[in-house]
Amino acid sequence: MDPKRVLIMGAAGRDFHNFNTCYRQNPAYRVVAFTANQIPNIDGRMYPPQLAGPLYPEGIRIYPEAELPRLIRECRVDQVVFSYSDISHEDVMHKASVALAAGADFVLPGPRATALKSCKPVVAVCAVRTGAGKSPTSRYVVAYLMKKGLRVAIVRHPMPYGDLVKEEVQRFATYDDFTRYQSTIEEREEYEPYVRQGVPIFAGVDYEKILRLAEQECDVVLWDGGNNDLPFYQPDLHITIADPHRAGHELLYHPGEANLRAASVILIGKTGSASKEQVALVRANAHAANPKAVVLNTDLQITARNGIAVRGKRVIVVEDGPTLTHGGMAYGAGTLYARKCEATIVDASRHAVGSIKEVYNKYPHLRKILPAMGYSEHQVRELEETINQTPCDLVIEATPIQLKRLMHIDKPVVEISYEMKTQPRFNRLLDEFAANLADRHPETAVFTAAALQGSLH
């Protein structure tokens, strides 16, 4: 039989992983195209033959997702494989309807087909939405396990926005590595905090090769999942973060709901700044969807890393970019800090230029707050111009990176950090997990929800 003709819908991450694990060496299928969405400037590229393998000597073209109906027709596509994350269930089915109407199957590959097995224990930290608090939770887990004497290597969900061949396997341990890999602001937001912790972080395109490299340096692999994607590695401890500021979204987004249902531990984050009603709704949904999971409340400690006075000042607030854009949040930790200090937030959108102005047009829910966008050097310069021409006294920088390393800012900058507060019951679970590692073999190392429940009694 002729191989089935496949098109993979993606956003420069999960799509490449699904190809590598399910299709790259499978002669029963022929991937004829990728499409790209969510991230600017990632269409019009090629998944190169050096990564695509011998079945694809010319590589695979990447097209804008808007061309999906034409591609299905002209490329005689049999199956459309949906391969990106943080998208509502309704929007997933709209895209399925486009594929079905054009005559193709619509496929959602699952973890059994795509999650790789490690020879080391894996802790997966995932979320129901972008910006739920996954990164501070990951840093908390890393620091806690290191105090137990365990070596931890972080593997981060992919963000390969540049030369895919050069980014096949990346290891970050120093600030020089960001220059070497020409990392975007979005990449640095995720990687810099780990570099400051002194922990190696791995990322790239080929997550089999990445895993085998990381395993050589650690006792435990921590999977830091981007957006609300499923883990690329089979987890021994699956932690999912739910966000009460978007109560109800834990059942409305793909594949966030799958993470909620698969988790052995569900952490409800940001409880100190959410209402009791919001927290109660998330807890009820978590218990209904996954009654075997341990469900715990957590919160963030938001502090300023320098001593610049903020109270009563006119400020511009720069927040984590993806949290505000496809994460759908209208504010973040910087906004909460500004409100606490009774500062006046200046409307940055009125002074935005170029692609930054386009971001406000694309995401109309954004008001005043400035997302730290920097997918290219040109966009970094436009972010710099937007900050500098916004009239204010201070810049509140709530992105995890130090923007002054990348641009000249002509105003004082207040650097905001947000870390997960100590959670004693969660600590007990991590104690139990660490204590069991020495006695477990990789093939039987899954730390089940039932075991976790028992450790709390």
Image (spheres, rainbow, N blue to C red):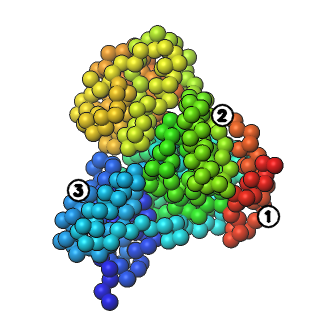
The answer to whether one can see residue 428 in this image is: yes
Residue in the picture at 25% in, 35% down = 361
- Residue 421's label in the rendered image is 2
The answer to which image quadrant residue 82 occupies is bottom left
Residue 383 x %, y %: 32, 31
Kind of element beneath mark 3:
helix
Q: Is residue 445 left or right of residue 49?
A: right
| Of callouts 2 and 1, the N-terminal one | 2
Residue in the picture at 37% in, 40% down = 325
- Residue 66's label in the rendered image is 3
Classify 10 Å Cα crowding around label 3: few (below 14), some (14-19), many (20 and above).
Answer: few
Residue 32 x %, y %: 28, 72
Classify 10 Å Cα crowding around label 2: few (below 14), some (14-19), many (20 and above).
Answer: some
Q: Is residue 355 left or right of residue 299?
A: left
Kind of element beneath mark 1:
loop
Residue 397 x %, y %: 45, 27
Query: Of 284 and 241, which appears nearest the observer?
Result: 284
Residue 208 vertical position relative to residue 292 in the rendered view, above or below? below
The answer to whether one can see residue 48 in this image is: no
Residue 280 vertical position relative to residue 120 in the rendered view, above or below? above
Q: Which residue is mark 1?
A: 439
Q: Amino acid at mark 2?
A: Lys
Image quadrant for the N terminus?
bottom left
Q: Amino acid at mark 1?
A: Asp
